[in-house]
């Protein structure tokens, strides 16, 4: 059956053909900088971003303003930032990061680099950070600050970084030495799959998600600058640990529910068997009447364990449906990126 091609269809088909023909061309990079009241450090961050990188066709800078009350936006405009995305109110680092990723994808970015607005990371390391992405060797590239030995960090922070990274390596099954680094490069494929749910920080959740999704993670050393201020994400080390633990637990429940809940259920069942076995022992020797409380306690734990195991399988079914929804969202983002590529080609 012959189908008549309309002018619009033909034009779109030719544009897609040109994109396919240029698929091996140098990629388009957007460097995003989430900011909240960073008027003091933002000029140094922007000045450090290299505008020309070997293997990159175009470098653009994107500032995500998270409801700043100072001159952050005005300074970004004055310094010629290519994209400014504004939150009407402060929504937190994780939400700002997600907003920036979506905006960069809508503008056709092939690689998205994230760096912090407090000038913690040296812009000179961006060229090294994107090389594995340019070569197609990694979905996500992490900027490794060598937190275990970086003298810019106090001893307590170095210890927490080592322990935290070890936990993430175990949970996500990925080779990562600096799990909470904010210096990262995402390929378009990886960025299209990002859906940050937490409000605290995107760093841990995105790594657990990436590990469970089978993405390829690489790390490259990055240079850091001296701290200009204390972190605004947390007030104390205790608060940081608490928030990260909550994030890890939520991420495990979201991305690996069967493993998480099933393990918890089996542990509870095992605990319940101990007092039941104790009661059965005394019952067998004729002294069961004085140990009925062991039977009651064991029954409570066995019921709790049974319910937790059921929750494990129900959560796995829900997670399967969520993955289907994520697949639909990725397809939608791919279409948006294709439209952005067509518009760029026409320009």
Image (cartoon, rainbow, N blue to C red):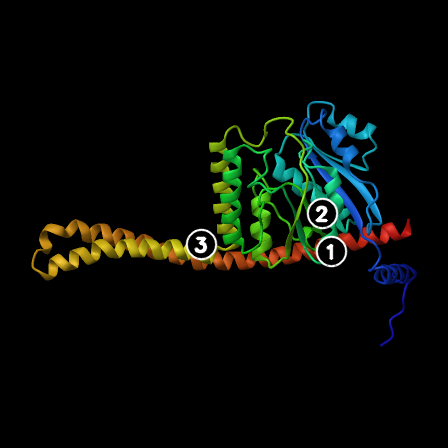
Q: Residue furthest right?
A: 7
Q: What percent of the width, then of the height, locates residue 345?
A: 88, 53
Label 2 packing within 10 angstroms: few (<14), some (14-19), many (20+): many
First in sequence: mark 1 vs mark 3 = 3
User: Nearer the viewer's eye, disc 1 or disc 3?
Assistant: 3
Q: Which residue is label 2 attached to?
A: 129
Which numbered marker is on residue 334? 1
- Dot 3 lies on which element? helix
Tell whether 147 sits left or right of 134: left
**In this rendering, does residue 107 appear at all?**
no
Q: CA distance from mark 1 to mark 3?
A: 32 Å
Label 3 packing within 10 angstroms: few (<14), some (14-19), many (20+): some
Label 1 packing within 10 angstroms: few (<14), some (14-19), many (20+): some
Is there CB contact under 8 Å for labels 1 and 3?
A: no
Which quadrant of the figure contains the N terminus? bottom right
Q: Which residue is label 3 attached to?
A: 260
Q: What percent of the width, then of the height, locates residue 79?
A: 82, 30
First in sequence: mark 2 vs mark 1 = 2
Q: What percent of the width, then of the height, locates residue 130?
A: 74, 49
- Dot 2 lies on which element? helix
Front-most of residues 32 and 16: 32
First in sequence: mark 3 vs mark 2 = 2
**In this rendering, does residue 223 appear at all?**
yes
Which residue is at 57% across, 40% downward?
149
Q: What percent of the width, then of the height, locates residue 75?
A: 78, 26
């Amino acid at each position: 059956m012959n189908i008549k091609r309309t002018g619009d269809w033909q034009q779109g088909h030719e544009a897609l053909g040109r994109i396919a023909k240029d698929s091996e061309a140098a990629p388009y990079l957007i460097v995003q900088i989430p900011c909240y009241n960073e008027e003091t450090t933002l000029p140094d961050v922007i000045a450090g971003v290299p505008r020309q990188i070997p293997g990159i066709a175009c470098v653009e800078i994107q500032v995500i303003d998270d409801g700043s009350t100072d001159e952050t936006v005005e300074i970004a405009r004055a310094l010629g930032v290519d994209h400014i995305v504004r939150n009407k109110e402060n929504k937190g680092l994780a939400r700002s990061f997600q907003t920036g990723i979506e905006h960069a994808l809508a503008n056709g970015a092939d690689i998205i680099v994230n760096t912090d607005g407090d000038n913690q990371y040296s812009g000179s390391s961006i060229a090294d950070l994107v090389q594995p992405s340019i070569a197609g060797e990694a979905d996500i590239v992490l900027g490794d600050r060598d937190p275990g030995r970086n003298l810019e960090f106090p001893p307590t922070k170095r210890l927490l970084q080592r322990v935290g990274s070890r936990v993430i390596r175990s949970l996500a099954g990925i080779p990562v030495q600096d799990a909470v680094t904010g210096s990262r490069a995402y390929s378009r494929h990886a960025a299209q799959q990002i859906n940050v749910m937490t409000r605290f920080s995107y760093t841990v959740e995105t790594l657990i998600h990436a590990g469970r999704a089978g993405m390829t993670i690489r790390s490259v050393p990055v240079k850091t600058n001296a701290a200009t201020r204390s972190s605004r994400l947390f007030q104390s080390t205790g608060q940081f640990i608490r928030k990260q633990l909550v994030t890890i637990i939520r991420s495990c429940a979201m991305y690996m529910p069967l493993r998480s809940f099933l393990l918890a259920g089996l542990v509870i069942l095992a605990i319940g068997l101990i007092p039941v076995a104790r009661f059965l022992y005394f019952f067998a020797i004729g002294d069961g009447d004085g140990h009925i409380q062991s039977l009651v306690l064991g029954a409570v734990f066995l019921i709790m364990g049974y319910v937790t195991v059921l929750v494990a399988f129900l959560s796995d079914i829900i997670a399967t449906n969520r993955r289907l929804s994520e697949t639909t969202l990725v397809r939608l983002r791919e279409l948006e990126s294709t439209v952005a590529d067509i518009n760029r080609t026409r320009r």
